[in-house]
């Protein structure tokens, strides 16, 4: 009976991992073209940014490191379970306390590993951004304000300057041109949110009372996710938008369309305002 329960409980993590791996293979369109091996990029969505590979290599490095430690720990545990099996060891259990050597080893070893990771990852952001320096070549600056539970965006319009009369306003729609630096001015209107573009490997907290600058360059057109990665209230799950990466011509055309729509709305609203 004990073995039945042991196997039943063991099946939970095994089936859970299996279901996760299978669902990830289905979720990633690029994985279908590959032989669907668990180590063939099925953990992360397609990287469409210029700098994302730096973040990915750090992610994989930590995954391999913690994975190796996990397998070693589980292996030792399994070995102990087999070696000190109840039937082969009928004597009562003897408890041992206070091995200073062991204490020192299992304190210093994880501390050293954590310190190594801390130092190793310190320059990841710099490595991802510094080879290209600050955003250049006439970057587009878009203001993004997070609030429960949506993204409010302001585009600079034709003059490419924010906070001028030709600004364009959208909600949950982030349009950007491909192969051009985009700078996001990120703010929050209420609580902590996190601006997350999984395909661009960009994740930045939006903090009330602060303005964060984050920049990136998309290298592939298409439609991708914009999500909130900080549990920010009951509607957090639905705080998602659309990232549309398009050619410069398509982006310009979209901007013209939006300007036209904004002008129509303003003209229609004007008499109502005049009456007051
Ligand atoms: Cu949020």
Image (cartoon, grey):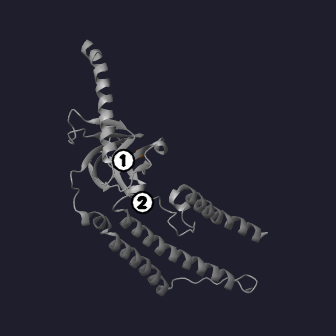
Ligand 1 occupies quarter? top left
From the top left corner, tell me how far across and down residue 220 is, in percent. Answer: 38, 55
Rendered image quadrant of residue 214:
bottom left
N-terminal label among 1 and 2: 2
Report the residue at 60% width, 60% height from top.
Answer: 22
From the top left corner, tell me how far across and down residue 145 is, in percent. Answer: 32, 42
Rendered image quadrant of residue 136:
bottom left
Residue mark closest to the camera, 1 vs 2? 1
Q: Quadrant of the C terminus?
A: top left
| SS of the residue under disc 2 | loop
| SS of the residue under disc 1 | strand
Q: Nearer the viewer, residue 32 or 162?
A: 32
From the top left corner, tell me how far across and down residue 71 is, in percent. Answer: 56, 76
Q: Would residue 258 be seen by someone viewing this image from the given angle?
A: yes
Rendered image quadrant of residue 25:
bottom right
Is residue 223 rendered to the left or right of residue 253? right
Q: Label 2: few (<14), some or many (≥20) within 10 Å?
A: some
What's the mark number on residue 246? 1
The residue furthest front is: 249
- Cα gap from disc 1 to disc 2, whole angstroms: 16 Å
Report the residue at 38% width, 50% height from top.
Answer: 194
From the top left corner, tell me how far across and down residue 171 is, in percent. Answer: 37, 37
- Identify whether 69 is placed above or below 272: below
The residue where tag 2 is placed is: 47
Could you tell me if the residues under marks 1 and 2 are in contact, i.e. CB atoms within 8 Å? no
Q: Nearer the viewer, residue 125 or 251?
A: 251
Q: Would residue 28 be seen by someone viewing this image from the given angle?
A: no
- Identify whether 105 is placed above or below 269: below
Instruction: Indicate if the residue with disc 2 has its beta carbon within 8 Å of ligand 1.
Output: no
Task: Count numbered badges in the picture.
Answer: 2
């Amino acid at each position: 009976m004990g073995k039945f329960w042991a196997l039943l409980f063991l099946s939970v993590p095994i089936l859970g991992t299996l279901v996760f791996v299978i669902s990830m293979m289905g979720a990633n369109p690029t994985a279908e073209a590959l032989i669907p091996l668990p180590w063939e990029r099925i953990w992360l969505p397609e990287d469409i940014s210029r700098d994302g590979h730096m973040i990915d290599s750090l992610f994989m490095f930590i995954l391999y490191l913690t994975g190796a430690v996990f397998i070693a720990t589980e292996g030792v545990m399994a070995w102990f379970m087999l070696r000190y099996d109840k039937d082969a060891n009928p004597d009562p259990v003897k408890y041992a306390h206070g091995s200073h050597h062991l204490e020192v080893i299992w304190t210093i070893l994880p501390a050293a590993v954590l310190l190594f990771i801390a130092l190793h990852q310190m320059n990841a952001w710099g490595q991802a951004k510094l080879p290209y320096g600050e955003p250049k070549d006439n970057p587009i600056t878009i203001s993004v304000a997070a609030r429960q539970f949506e993204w409010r965006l302001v585009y600079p319009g034709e003059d490419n300057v924010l906070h001028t009369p030709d600004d364009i306003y959208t909600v949950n729609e982030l349009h950007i041109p491909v192969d051009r630096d985009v700078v996001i001015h990120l703010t929050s209107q209420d609580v902590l949110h996190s601006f997350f573009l999984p395909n661009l490997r960009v994740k930045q907290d939006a903090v009330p009372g602060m303005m964060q600058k984050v920049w990136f360059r998309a290298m592939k057109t298409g439609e991708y996710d914009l999500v909130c990665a900080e549990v920010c209230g009951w509607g957090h799950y639905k705080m998602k938008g659309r990232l549309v990466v398009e050619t410069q011509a398509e982006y310009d055309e979209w901007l013209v369309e939006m300007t036209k729509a904004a002008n129509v709305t303003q003209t229609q609203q004007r008499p109502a305002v005049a009456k007051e």
